[in-house]
Image (cartoon, rainbow, N blue to C red):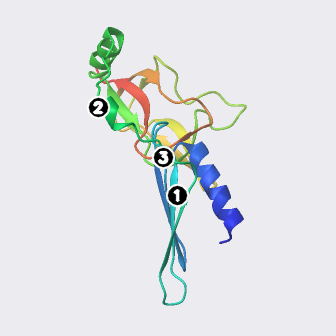
Amino acid sequence: MDLKEIQNLIKFVAKSGASEVKLEMDDIKITIKTGSEDNRETTYIQQYPMGGQMQQQMPQQQQHQPSQSQGSQETPVSKEAAEQASNDSKYITIKSPIIGTFYRKPSPDKATFVEVGDSIKEGDVLCIIEAMKLFNEIESEVSGKVVKVLVDDSSPVEFDQPLFLVDPS
């Protein structure tokens, strides 16, 4: 794997929104970790050439560290955010089982699998997640009513990212 391929991989991971990606090949082990806006992207690459071990660190952007004088300040939570969190607690969250690209339709000219307000049952296909050129149908593990779709169509998703909110009642 050459430097250009590694740079392309870093760009792809940054765009996908994944927080961490590990890639192991014959003689190369790559771990790419991304953080929030306050904690910029850092890439670690370990190569194991023929018996020797070499570790290389390539920071993409310098990490931003808050100054010590600021101390730890908690951000006050707004009433709306608190109400939203309490309202969402009665719903079941359906999360992504894999990293990939989220699609709400089986193809561009077809209708979406589910819409907000639709009743679903166990085994119903909710969406497709494309990973490495494979299209994986994501089926519901619960019955209920779709309350909210949390991801835009054709957006990258990461493992365990919330996709749908379902009211089980």
Which residue is tagged 2? 71
N-terminal-most mark, 1 or 2: 1
Does 96 sit above or below residue 69?
below
Where residue 10 appears, x then y in whole percent? Answer: 60, 55
User: Could you classify mark 1 by the number of other residues whose Cα lies within 10 Å: few (under 14), some (14-19), or many (20 or more)?
Assistant: some
Work out how far the residue at label 2 is from the one at label 3, CA to CA, in angstroms: 18 Å
**Element type where label 1 sits in the image:** strand
Q: Classify the position of the C terminus by image quarter.
A: top left
Q: Contact (CB < 8 A) between labels 3 and 1?
A: no
Where residue 17 appears, x then y in whole percent? Answer: 53, 42
**Element type where label 3 sits in the image:** loop
Does 136 sit above or below residue 53?
above
Along the viewing direction, whichever of 112 and 148 lies nearer the viewer: 148
The answer to whether 90 appears left or right of 161 in the picture is: left
Amino acid at pointer 3: Gln
The answer to whether 79 appears left or right of 112 in the picture is: left
Work out how far the residue at label 1 is from the one at label 2, CA to CA, in angstroms: 28 Å
User: Could you classify mark 3 by the number of other residues whose Cα lies within 10 Å: few (under 14), some (14-19), or many (20 or more)?
Assistant: some
Where residue 50 appears, x then y in whole percent? Answer: 54, 89
Does 105 sit above or below residue 74?
below
Along the viewing direction, whichever of 96 and 113 lies nearer the viewer: 96
Which residue is tagged 1? 43
Which residue is tagged 3? 63
Amino acid at pointer 1: Thr
Q: Which mark is residue 113?
A: none
Q: Nearer the viewer, mark 2 or mark 3?
A: 2
Residue extending farthest bottom: 51
Residue extending farthest top: 79
Residue drawn at point x = 26 percent, y = 21 percent: 90
**Element type where label 2 sits in the image:** loop
